[in-house]
Amino acid sequence: MPGLHWSESEKKIARRAFDRAANALLTQTIDEFKAKAAAVAKPEDLWALQDDLRERRHHIEALLDYRYSQLTHVFGLLIAQGHLTEQQLEDLAEDKLALIRRTLAWCKAA
């Protein structure tokens, strides 16, 4: 969200949490890819796997947006998807936590 001020300690917390979540997401993607690649039996399976991976990459690149104006939204999405926990962000200021919770609530309602 534009206009939020991130202190140096919050920036460190955010970077650490973001990197952990990104690593978890990418590790999950690798594991899923390996399982799907092992199941490829015919050429059309290979192209379907390629399409799936391309779509997944697009989703990941859109999600992993490390701009401070976007981080509260990104964190809410990462929590909703199970790649991050609220506890990993508990030392952020309440204004940021409230925005993260708002995104999380929206995800749960959708």
Image (cartoon, rainbow, N blue to C red):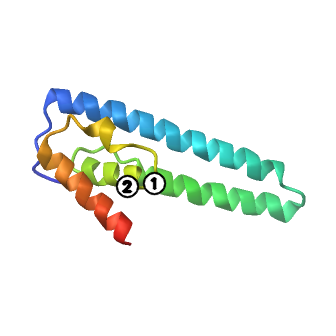
- Give the residue at mark 1: 81
Q: Nearer the viewer, residue 84 or 64?
A: 84
Residue 102 horizontal/vertical position (percent): 23, 60
Residue 96 horizontal/vertical position (percent): 17, 47
Kind of element beneath mark 1: loop
- Give the residue at mark 2: 77
Residue in the picture at 58% in, 39% down? 27
Image height of 92 relative to 50, above or below: above
Residue 26 horizontal/vertical position (percent): 55, 42
Q: Pointers 1 and 2 in contact (CB under 8 A)?
A: yes
Q: Amino acid at mark 1?
A: Gln
**67 lies left or right of 79:** left
Within 10 Å of disc 1 (Cα), the crowding (few <14, some 14-19, many 20+) is: some
**Residue that protrudes farthest toward the bottom in the picture:** 110
Image height of 85 relative to 109, above or below: above
Q: Spatial distance from mark 1 to mark 2, Cα to Cα?
A: 6 Å
For residue 61, the mark is: none
Q: Quadrant of the N terminus?
A: bottom left
Q: Quadrant of the C terminus?
A: bottom left
Residue in the picture at 45% in, 45% down? 83
Residue in the picture at 46% in, 49% down? 82
Within 10 Å of disc 2 (Cα), the crowding (few <14, some 14-19, many 20+) is: many
Kind of element beneath mark 2: helix
**72 lies left or right of 62:** left
Residue 8 horizontal/vertical position (percent): 16, 27
**Residue that protrudes farthest toward the front in the picture:** 87
Total number of numbered labels?
A: 2
Q: Amino acid at mark 2?
A: Leu
